[in-house]
Image: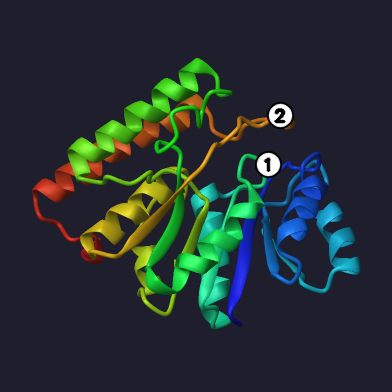
Amino acid sequence: MNKILIIPTYNEIENINVLYKKIRKFNKDLKILFIDDNSPDGTINEIKKLKKKDKKILFLLRKKKSGIGSAHKAGIKWAINNKVTFCITMDSDLTHDPKLISQMLKHAPKYHLVQTNRFMHKNSMASWPLYRRILTWMRYFLLRILLNIKYDSSGAFRCYNFKKMNPNLIFCAKNDSYSFFWETMYIFVKEQYLVKELKMIQNYRKSGDSKIQFKDWIHGFYYLFVIYFRDLLNISYKKL
């Protein structure tokens, strides 16, 4: 299998059909793998309806909500086992524009990773609540200063090239929540992987509830300093 789009879902029944139509508008033949954490709102039932009319729809149903990072790991593991070359991941809340997928795939053969960057456009997060913008910028600067990560490392809109990278290094990231994204980027920087970033405007979600909670932010900042001190002590992520 050459390429697949992986989309974790949890309580996205209001968005799933709209997202599917947007994806198919720009990508008619792309296989889509949904990872649903047993959403109580019935998201999986909408996915099953889509699957009946579109054979390129696949899904994994997990028993319970186990973290966004964990869902990405499950999807990536599936992609590795099915010998996928280009593995694209995105959010299910309509904040990622599917028309960028074709651009990602265009650049993907030359890079280990192609992803979007919200900091390359000054108005990218204009629709976000002020507190979310402040926290997101704060995390971006801390990651740049403490871990020398110059990329937008906390976003999920990515295209991995499994032919160029060692995809199993992704599982060296121990975090199963939102810190999974910057922790994997930390690993990619250490490996000196080539990363291509695409400018993106990311609108705030209009329907459904954001899954990230204040405790996730607190734990994320705490975990950042854990990785920072491990880095100071030269403790390899491969040995953790």
Image point (28%, 53%), residue name = 186
Q: Position of residue 102 (x, y in %)?
A: 60, 62
Q: Are marks 1 and 2 in contact (CB under 8 Å)?
A: yes
Residue 134 position within the rendered picture, expressed as x and y whole percent measured from the top left: 40, 21
Q: Amino acid at mark 2?
A: Lys
Describe residue 45's horizontal placement relative to residue 84 as left or right: right
Name the secondary structure under disc 2.
Answer: loop
Q: Which one is nearer the viewer's eye here, 222 or 18? A: 18
Of residues 25 and 211, the one drawn nearer to the viewer in this rendering: 25
Give the residue type that dot 1 points to. Answer: Leu
**Tag 2 or tag 1, which sits nearer the N-term?**
1
Depth check: give the residue in front, 213 or 51: 51
**Residue at coordinates 56% horizontally, 36% vertically from top-left?**
202
Q: Residues within 10 Å of mark 1 (few under 14, many from 20)?
A: many
| Residue highlighted by disc 1 | 94
Of residues 23 and 212, which is closer to you in this image?
A: 23
Is residue 207 visible in the rendered image? The answer is: yes
Q: State the separation of the CA atoms marked 1 and 2.
A: 8 Å
Residue located 55% across and 24% down the image: 128
Give the left or right position of residue 236, taking residue 12 as reference.
Answer: left
- Quadrant for the N terminus, please: bottom right
Q: Quadrant of the C terminus?
A: bottom left
Where residue 196 appears, x then y in whole percent?
A: 38, 58
* Residue at the disc numbered 2: 206
Count of numbered marks: 2
Quadrant of the rendered image containing residue 189: bottom left
